[in-house]
Amino acid sequence: MAWPGRGTQGRPGHASQGKGVRTLTAAARAAEPLVDDAYLVARAQEGYLDAYELLVQRHSAMAYRVALRLTGNHHDAQDVAQEALISAWENLVRFRAGSSFSTWLYQIVTRRALNKVSRDRAASSLDLLPEVADPAGEPAAQTERNLAVGAVTDALLALPFPQRAVIVLHHFEGLSYAETASVTRSTEPAVRSHLFRARRALGKKLEEWR
């Protein structure tokens, strides 16, 4: 994908160093596992393109994972994750120091996924399952697992988006009530209410499947 640079054409991972683009020192890159997000964000805001590349490497899997669970579609999830990471780069100057980059990215991914789902109500859960030429030829245990994945996915996608979002963020991603409220720009009581309704709806759907 085309990464918008600051005064250059290119994306993280390429060696082009146009005007206004800086690179981290070899020592800083070697110490990357020990460097926190706040440091990388600050460097990226100063024009260090490879600092943002490291942020992308850290958080791209999360962005795709959340997008997939919210949209239920592999291709939509790829689009949402890519758009979110590009949007984060383009708006990095507005990121407030002291905030959590991951929470901010969760917010962007969730909003992008909502927009995608709102535009396309026909999102399918089939892309979450392995492609199988002949289900009858599968071992029974594998077939059962695939059916279970499909049932959970379908039940999740049947939830209203606000309920789906809190289930994905709180249960799948492990965010606290407060963090989930921050990402969804809601309140903790609202998050708890959505979770209660979502759990009840999921329980009914999965009971029907059984």
Image (tube, grey):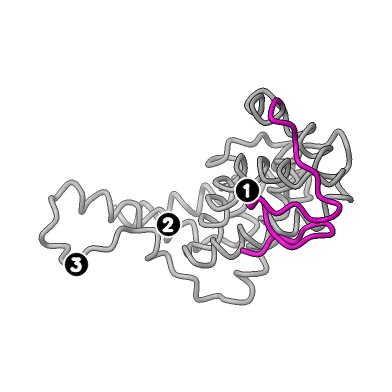
Q: What residue type is labelled 3?
A: Ala
Between 124 and 8, the residue placed more toward the observer is: 8
Quadrant position of residue 50: top right
Question: Residue 67 location, x and y as percent?
Answer: 57, 56
> Of the residues shown, which amino acid type is indicated by label 2?
Thr
* Residue range of the region highlighted in magenta in the rendering: 1-27
Q: In which quarter of the image is the N terminus?
A: bottom right
SS at circle 3: loop
Q: Specify whether residue 10 is painted magenta.
A: yes
- Lateral position of residue 178 relative to residue 135, left or right: right
Q: Name which residue lies at 20% across and 49% down.
A: 142
Residue tagged by mark 3?
133
Amino acid type, mark 1: Val
User: What residue is pinned by disc 1?
Assistant: 166
Could you tell me residue 165's position as x and y percent?
62, 53
Circle 2 residues within 10 Å: few <14, some 14–19, many ≥20: some
Residue drawn 61% across the image and 62% down it: 80
